[in-house]
Amino acid sequence: MSYRVALNFEDGATRIIDCKDGERVLDAAYRNKINLPMDCSDGVCGTCKCRCEEGEYELGDEYIEDALTEDEAAEGLVLTCQMLISSDCVISVPAPSSACKIKAQEYEAELKTVDLVSDSTIVLTLDLAGKGELDFLPGQYVNLNVPGTTETRAYSFSSRPRSDSVSFLIRNVPDGLMSRWLTDEAKPGVKMRFVGPNGSFFLRKVERPVILLAGGTGLAPMLSMLEVLTRSECNHPVHLIYGVNHDGDLAELERIKTLAANIPGFTWDCVVADENSHNPLRGYVTHHLDDARLNGGDCDIYLCGPPPMVEAVRVFLKRKNVEPRHFYYEKFAASEAV
Ligand SMILES: Cc1cc2nc3c(=O)[nH]c(=O)nc-3n(C[C@H](O)[C@H](O)[C@H](O)COP(=O)(O)OP(=O)(O)OC[C@H]3O[C@@H](n4cnc5c(N)ncnc54)[C@H](O)[C@@H]3O)c2cc1C
Ligand code: FES
């Protein structure tokens, strides 16, 4: 029996390794050619201290208080040279991936389909063409090379992890380098390269009501998270508010409906900013985020979209004096124009 451990480094790079039953995480990482920070490997120095974000584990009984205090243990800190896991885990490593001798993981995939699914949204699907399944945490992104150039663009997975094809929801930016390539030149079978997975914006264990706020193609990571929720037990309400500028920007509504049919407790609204919209809900996502949903702050919020939208939500919560238990966000910042 073995478990899946996602090691999430300080620079946002992630590696997912297997850890055998009874194997120490530090040893499993080493077997997977990752040198996690360590010194004594005996539970004495505390150098291997990391944070376990998710998963079941025992701390081990051979470490000393100087290496890990009771308070630290209560906060979720662990010693990777001692801990024994009993489920899949996500572990945050307080060091950059380069310090752990990890090279960026590169993939080459074949373009399967490219579809304009709304006035402003492209769905790109890549096939890993027999290279196995790609694993990542739902919500993470990759840096995708624009074919024929040395430029890359960041895109979040909209598909579920551990599949032999991956999808992205891409805003069709007028005159954008990647956008132009996708609309004018992309053809099935073309090879595309990407590096990843990256990022600390990913779905954690659902332990209280969850609110997902998506602006435009900021819907992509939410779709990936929801795909994962269709396969896991989720005993708390999950509510998505998806906002766009114009009716013609709305994308993937059928897919959201299918997800809603498959996730108990999942509800969603879409809202359009344009005042001439025919959509039942108009305005911004914050206009439809009511106090009942915020649950007095006892909720986890995931927010993703263009930087002004992310800022607007942050200001909204501050003004309302609501401090969610956890607040994770990703800004879809534009790349530097070339
Ligand atoms: C971590 C991360 C994850 C991301 N994930 C996604 C994703 O899943 N889907 C997605 O669509 N985007 C995502 N983005 C944003 C995406 O990387 C950029 O929007 C992308 O650079 C656009 O590429 P392009 O080559 O088509 O346009 P570019 O050639 O990069 O841009 C052309 C011009 O348009 C401007 N521009 C670029 N993007 C935007 C924008 N969004 N709004 C307004 N003006 C813009 C640029 O400043 C430039 O002047 C992500 C960004 C980050 C940082
Ligand atoms: S390496 Fe020293 S406590 Fe783990």
Image: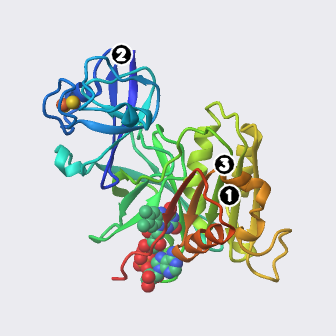
Q: Which mark is residue 252?
A: 1
Q: Position of residue 56 (x, y in %)?
A: 46, 25
Q: Position of residue 85 (x, y in %)?
A: 39, 22
Dot 2 amino acid type: Asp
Dot 1 amino acid type: Glu
Q: Quadrant of residue 144?
A: bottom left
Q: CA distance from mark 1 to mark 2?
A: 40 Å
Question: Does dot 3 land on a helix, a strand or a loop?
Answer: loop
Question: Does dot 2 land on a helix, a strand or a loop?
Answer: loop
Q: Position of residue 48 (x, y in %)?
A: 23, 36
* Residue depicted at x 82% and y 69%: 281
Mark 3, mark 1: which one is toward the viewer? 3
Q: Is residue 315 above or below residue 221?
A: below
* Residue depicted at x 47% and y 53%: 201
Crowd class of label 2 (few under 14; some 14 to 19; many from 20; radius 10 Å): few
Q: Nearer the viewer, residue 7 or 319?
A: 319
* Residue depicted at x 73% and y 57%: 253
Mark toward the start of the polypeptide (1 vs 2): 2
Mark toward the start of the polypeptide (3 vs 2): 2
Crowd class of label 1 (few under 14; some 14 to 19; many from 20; radius 10 Å): some
The residue that disc 3 covers is: 298
Q: CA distance from mark 3 to mark 2?
A: 35 Å
The residue that disc 2 covers is: 21
